[in-house]
Amino acid sequence: MVTVVSTNPHPSVVKEAICCNCGATLNYVPKDVQSKFYRDISGCGDTDYWINCPPCGSKVMVKAPR
């Protein structure tokens, strides 16, 4: 049976990013990351990963969550 020890994220999963628009330092966990898959004109695909900056609303590009 699963039991909850703490509702705070473990420090090992918390990541940090800096918004290039407003300079805010942001802490995030993998569930905060949004993604979009797209294909370019040659047919190759790629995925962008980002979080939204709460103070200014900009997209902050991050690495793919694991």
Image (cartoon, helix red, strand yellow):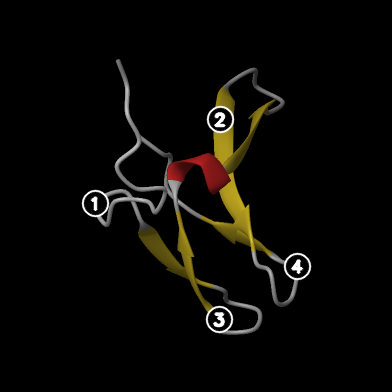
Residue 2 quadrant:
top left
Mark-to-mark CA distance, 3 and 1: 21 Å
Give whichever of discs 3 and 2 has the lower sequence position: 3
Q: Is 19 on the left-hand or right-hand side of 1?
A: right
The residue identified by callout 1 is 12
Mark-to-mark CA distance, 3 and 4: 11 Å
Q: Are marks 1 and 2 in contact (CB under 8 Å)?
A: no
Q: Where residue 57 appears, x then y in whole percent?
A: 75, 67
Q: Residue furthest bottom?
A: 23
Q: Residues within 10 Å of mark 2 (few under 14, many from 20)?
A: few
The residue type indicated by label 2 comes to Asp
Circle 4: element type: loop
Give whichever of discs 4 and 2 has the lower sequence position: 2
Which circle, 4 or 1, is nearer the viewer? 1
Which circle, 3 or 2, is nearer the viewer? 3
The residue identified by callout 2 is 46
- The mark tally for this picture is 4
Mark-to-mark CA distance, 4 and 2: 23 Å
Which circle, 4 or 2, is nearer the viewer? 4
The residue type indicated by label 4 comes to Gly
Mark-to-mark CA distance, 4 and 1: 26 Å
Q: Residues within 10 Å of mark 4 (few under 14, many from 20)?
A: few
Q: Nearer the viewer, residue 62 or 41?
A: 62
Q: Where residue 35 appears, x then y in whole percent?
A: 61, 37
The residue identified by callout 3 is 24
The residue identified by callout 4 is 57
